Image: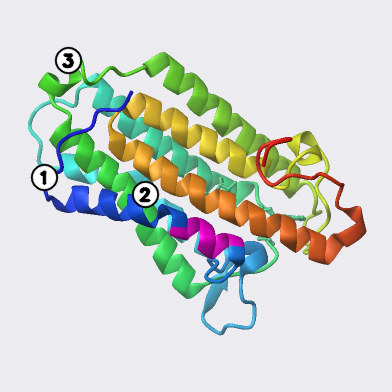
Amino acid sequence: MFYLPEFNGSVAHWILAVYLVSSPMFFVSEATGSMSFGYSKFADRKKARALPSRLGMFIIYFPAVFAFWLPAIGRDAPIPGWHALAGALMSAHFAKRCLEVLFVHRYSGVMNLGSVAMICTLYTTVSGLMGWIAFHEIDATVLSSGDFTPKLRLGLVVWGLGTAINFWHHRILANLRKPGETGYVLPKRGLFRFVACPHYLGEIIAWWGYSIVFCHVGAAIASLAMTFYLAGRAHNTVKWYRERLGDQVPKGWRRLVPFVY
Ligand SMILES: NC(=O)c1ccc[n+]([C@@H]2O[C@H](COP(=O)([O-])OP(=O)(O)OC[C@H]3O[C@@H](n4cnc5c(N)ncnc54)[C@H](OP(=O)(O)O)[C@@H]3O)[C@@H](O)[C@H]2O)c1
């Protein structure tokens, strides 16, 4: 399903190896809260070094809109269709997040500065890494080889479905607060009837859709790392709701996947 090049010791391959090995640690650190990234419900509001959430969130996403294209700088040849699609999807994903940060979400707090720096680096690296892989490892020979069989339609449908689920639930969350309100209430609409984090589920589906389009194992590794991360954060989110809103939390409310997890 995914094109798997031989490990060649390049920086890109080492980064992928580190992502792969550290994925379960993302889960554990978020699920236990031992090293949760400091934003939204899990921000440390007493820390002096923090930015307003909207600004911090915008900073983490904005460079990733463009990072995919950096490895193409200086290239003389025209950009082939597959590369253009892979780049456009990556830019669209992060541009959507920037626009949601600016115009959809209603934030109540801060984002700790260390988390801004770390998450910004992670997203920029993922976007740039996919660009590097695209422009350095996927040439016409690879594109037409039997090992590399892009399933563009399937990937686009999965990506679109995940993105729509994600956006839908961001709107539901935003509508929980009137302008200026900062409290937390239990979300009940959409898939929130069944799970605490359907927006994370949408994000995960979108990343796997991207991986199907991208076809190279690098995108699958990035998606795996994000799946672990968001599954861990969803676990801690249910715990957070139970501790704060106890009786209101429905019995059998799951974290991410209705009736399953
Ligand atoms: N690819 C990845 O690895 C990754 C990782 C994390 C996030 N993301 C993306 O970022 C999106 C947002 O993630 P997030 O962790 O910031 O989500 P979140 O904690 O659920 O917050 C999203 C927004 O909803 C508000 N909110 C959350 N629960 C609320 C409640 N019970 N009542 C009222 N308002 C509430 C938050 O306000 P406050 O800020 O005031 O809490 C924030 O404005 C995800 O859906 C995903 O698309 C991607």
Checking the image for residue 145, the label placed there is none
Checking the image for residue 8, the label placed there is 1
- What residue span does the magenta drawing correspond to? 25-31
Q: Magenta: predominant secondary structure element?
A: helix
Nearer the observer, 251 or 64: 251
**Residue under numbered circle 3:** 144
**Residue for point 41% across, 31% down:** 210
Please rate how many residues cluster around mark 3, counting C-alpha atoms within 10 Å: few if below 14, some from 14 to 19, many from 20.
few
Q: Can residue 55 be seen in the rendering of this structure? A: no
Nearer the observer, 224 or 156: 224
**Residue for point 15% across, 34% down:** 137
Q: Which amino acid does label 2 sit on?
A: Ala
Look at the numbered discs 1 and 3 and tell me whether their residues touch, using CB distance below 8 Å.
no
Which of the marked residues, 3 or 2, is nearer the chain's N terminus?
Answer: 2
Give above or below for 136 relative to 67: above
Nearer the observer, 139 or 225: 225
Secondary structure of the residue carrying tag 1 is loop
Secondary structure of the residue carrying tag 2 is helix
x%, y% of residue 261?
Answer: 67, 42
